Image (tube, rainbow, N blue to C red):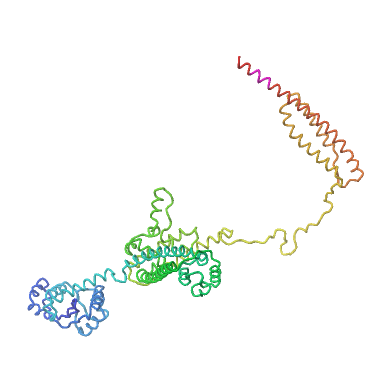
């Protein structure tokens, strides 16, 4: 029987010389109290040495997972033909038996034997001293602990936190320097600010041009992509209203332009570095929300591990803490998004659906962060799948809104032809087309005098209708009866007035037209009398009212 023993230096195979002592497990430890007694029980048969630390680490990690390494399989195939192999791990024994067809043994006697071998290891293996075994075991244990914790210099998120902080600072400095260049050079060439809007292009143009007089003889095609902008620049340089600037001032302005261009170039390099680090450390988070948003989330959370401990609801409002606590204090609605608002998926959504998409994106982001921080894989498959799901959800939400705006409740607008007046199965209409009827026309009178008389009578009727309620309120009971009689007479007179007919004879028209002025004059005289009577009654009522007031005042004074 052979015994497989793992050491920091390699794998050792010991041959058991006296297998009968394995039956007495309780007394087995006595045989390993000294090296001489141990050599009577076991003997070193073969030793497989590790070439370097990485080889030792890979073999040890596979042994921990109960899997034999490639070197171990070759070593066992060479030395274990037809032998029974004692192993310290039953799962490892099953794996060796399945792959190499070697019978393995694991029991309490084997574990006690392993304990004795570990006690006398340096004596049983020649060339392996205790002074060498200690540092090897310590180094291997450190490597194993790093591997268990998934610690790797490629996974350090501190660099991301520093890089995104420096990137934000560079953006602020670049903006400040660019505004200073515009303000400084604006005294000499103020029109250039409106012509060239990009800060980097502005700095390049100022550095190349110097004095605005040189603009006519220079070629700006490498800096300005549009020929029209270049033509506007040259025209504005000729008729510019700016002041003259000395050569020393232009030299300092060009030095400031060099600083702006150097900062912009370094910012580009820093962004590329940040992009590569994010794709290495958090590939799924990068695929879901982008490099900048993912880096800001990691920096705000403190580390990738700390961010992985947060739920999706916290990630959704991360960066909007002030708004959250203000809303809780004032009992208003809480914010729907924080730093995650700058993700491209939320930017694609309409204002109505931003809250729903941010909630879905935060949940998927939490899963992606946990996989990046604690998972074994290094691909971005989960991030890409989650992004596709959110994009389909966004399309569904946006499609629903579009369908609702189309007009129908189910989403599809119903367009129906108007078939009310059409026969079934025929092209003709059920009702005939309407024709023009000349008999329904009204013929207006040609003379103007009857029109004027009719208008006058209508105005008088309106005036009488307005004055009648006032008169009824003022007059007493006896006067009201007289007025009612007069009203009845007026209604009879109005009914007796002849109407002008279109189909009547011309003679009748002339006679009626001659009679109308006389009737109008009679009615006018009657109305004048009525108005005078009403005015007299109103005067009498006013005088009686004044007398009553005077009497009341006298009674009050008495």
Q: Can residue 183 be seen in this view?
A: yes
- Residue 494: percent from the left, percent from the top? 82, 36
On screen, residue 327 above or below 260: above
Quadrant for residue 377, please give it.
Answer: bottom left
Give left or right: position of 354 versus 121. right
Residue that sits furthest to the right in the current view = 507
Name which quarter of the figure residue 513 lies in: top right
Give the left or right position of residue 543, taking residue 14 as reference. right
Asked whether residue 328 is drawn in magenta, I would say no
Residue 383 seen in the current view: no
Residue drawn at the location 75% of the way across and 35% of the way down? 465
Q: Position of residue 394 (x, y in %)?
A: 48, 63
For the C terminus, give its image quadrant: top right
- Name the spot of residue 516 as percent of width and height, x first: 87, 38
**Is 55 situated above or below 362?**
below
Residue 423 relative to residue 351: left or right = right
Residue sitting at 83 percent across and 40 percent down?
Answer: 453
Q: Quadrant of residue 489?
A: top right
Examine the residues drawn in magenta and state their main secondary structure.
helix
Instruction: Say which residue appears at 39% left-offset and 53% top-offset.
Output: 322
Which of the image's four quarters has the N terminus?
bottom left
- Above or below: residue 473 compared with residue 168: above
Which span is picked out in magenta?
546-552
Of the pair 157 and 42, the residue shown nearer to us: 157
């Amino acid at each position: 029987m052979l015994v497989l023993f793992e050491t920091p230096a390699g794998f050792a195979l010991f041959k058991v010389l006296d297998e009968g002592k394995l039956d007495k497990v309780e007394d087995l430890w006595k045989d390993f109290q000294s090296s001489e007694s141990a050599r009577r029980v076991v003997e070193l048969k073969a030793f497989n040495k590790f070439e370097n630390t990485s080889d030792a680490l890979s073999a040890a990690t596979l042994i921990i997972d109960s899997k034999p390494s490639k070197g171990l399989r070759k070593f066992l195939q060479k030395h274990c033909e037809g032998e029974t192999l004692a192993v310290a791990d039953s799962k490892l024994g099953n794996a060796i038996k399945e792959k190499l067809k070697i019978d393995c043994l694991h029991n309490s006697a084997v574990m006690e034997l392993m304990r004795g071998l570990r006690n006398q290891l340096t004596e049983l293996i020649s060339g392996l001293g205790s002074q060498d075994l200690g540092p090897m075991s310590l180094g291997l244990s450190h490597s194993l602990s790093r591997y268990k914790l998934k610690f790797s210099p490629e996974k350090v998120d501190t660099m991301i936190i520093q890089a995104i902080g420096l990137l934000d600072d560079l953006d602020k400095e670049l903006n400040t320097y660019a505004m200073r260049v515009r303000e400084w050079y604006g005294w000499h060439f103020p029109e250039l600010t409106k012509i060239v809007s990009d800060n980097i292009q502005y700095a390049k143009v100022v550095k190349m041009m110097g004095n605005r007089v040189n603009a006519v003889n220079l070629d700006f095609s490498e800096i300005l992509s549009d020929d029209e902008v270049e033509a506007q620049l040259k025209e504005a340089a000729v008729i510019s209203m700016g002041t003259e600037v000395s050569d020393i001032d232009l030299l300092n302005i060009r030095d400031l332009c060099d600083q702006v261009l150097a900062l912009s170039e370094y910012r580009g390099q820093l962004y590329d570095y940040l992009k590569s680090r994010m794709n290495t450390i958090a590939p799924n988070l990068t695929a879901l929300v982008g490099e900048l948003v993912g880096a800001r989330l990691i920096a705000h959370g403190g580390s990738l591990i700390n961010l992985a401990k947060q739920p999706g609801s916290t990630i959704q409002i991360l960066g909007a803490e002030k708004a959250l606590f203000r809303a809780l204090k004032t009992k208003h609605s809480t914010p729907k998004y924080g730093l995650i608002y700058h993700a491209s998926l939320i930017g694609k959504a309409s204002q109505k659906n931003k809250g729903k998409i941010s909630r879905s994106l935060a949940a998927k982001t939490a899963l992606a962060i946990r996989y990046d921080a604690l998972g074994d894989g290094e691909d971005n498959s989960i991030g890409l799948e989650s992004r596709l799901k959110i994009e389909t959800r966004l399309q569904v939400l946006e499609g629903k809104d579009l369908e609702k705006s189309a007009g129908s409740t189910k989403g599809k607008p119903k367009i129906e032809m108007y078939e009310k007046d059409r026969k079934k199965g025929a092209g003709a209409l059920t009702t005939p087309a309407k024709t023009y009827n000349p008999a329904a026309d009204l013929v207006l009178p040609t003379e103007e005098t009857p029109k004027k008389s009719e208008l006058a009578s209508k105005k008088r009727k309106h005036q009488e209708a307005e004055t009648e309620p006032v008169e009824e309120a003022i007059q007493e009971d006896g006067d009201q009866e007289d007025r009612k009689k007069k009203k009845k007479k007026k209604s009879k007179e109005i009914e007796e007035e002849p109407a002008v007919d279109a189909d009547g004879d011309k003679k009748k028209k002339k006679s009626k037209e001659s009679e109308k002025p006389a009737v109008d004059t009679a009615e006018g005289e009657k109305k004048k009398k009525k108005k005078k009577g009403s005015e007299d009654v109103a005067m009498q009522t006013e005088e009686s009212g004044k007398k009553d007031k005077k009497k009341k005042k006298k009674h009050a004074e008495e």
